[in-house]
Image (tube, helix red, strand yellow):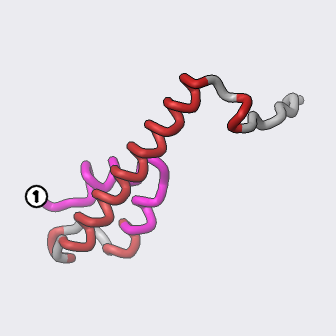
Amino acid sequence: MAKNHPRKKWSDLTTGQRIALIVAATLELTLAASAWRDLARRPAARVRGPKGLWGAIIAVNFVGPVAYFIAGRVR
């Protein structure tokens, strides 16, 4: 049986943990925004599969934008 661990509050995090969280969140948002921008500007003929589906996939943290850049675009 799994133990319930209380969630940490922002004030419970160390300075290093706060910085790491901010960096990770910034990286994720930048990566997703770049992928959505590319998807919006790329013609549908140069995208593998439906653009709407890729738009939803990009919303999946880190994995989605990376998957789009690797597999979603036709070069």
The reply to whether residue 48 is in sight is no
Q: Quadrant of residue 7?
A: top right
Left or right: residue 46 versus residue 28 is left
Left or right: residue 60 versus residue 38 is right
| Residue sitting nearer the eye, 34 or 3 | 34
**Which of the image's four quarters has the C terminus?**
bottom left
67 in the magenta segment: yes
| Magenta span dominant secondary structure | helix
| Residue sitting nearer the eye, 54 or 14 | 14
Q: Quadrant of residue 37?
A: bottom left
User: Residue at 42% across / 47% down in the picture?
Assistant: 28
Left or right: residue 73 versus residue 50 is left
Q: How many marks?
A: 1
Q: Quadrant of residue 12?
A: top right
Q: Identity of the amino acid at label 1?
A: Arg
Position of residue 42 measured from the top left corner of the image (x, y, whole percent)? 18, 71
Please say if 14 is above or below 71: above
What are the residue bounds of the magenta stretch? 55-75
Position of residue 33 measured from the top left corner of the image (x, y, whole percent)? 34, 59
User: Residue at 75% across / 34% down in the picture?
Assistant: 8
Position of residue 53 measured from the top left corner of the image (x, y, whole percent)? 40, 70
User: Residue at 30% across / 59% down in the picture?
Assistant: 35
**Where is mark 1, residue-wise?**
75
Disc 1 packing (10 Å; few <14; some 14–19; many ≥20): few
Please say if 39 is above or below 1: below
40 in the magenta segment: no
**Which of the image's four quarters has the N terminus?**
top right
User: Residue at 22% across / 68% down in the picture?
Assistant: 47
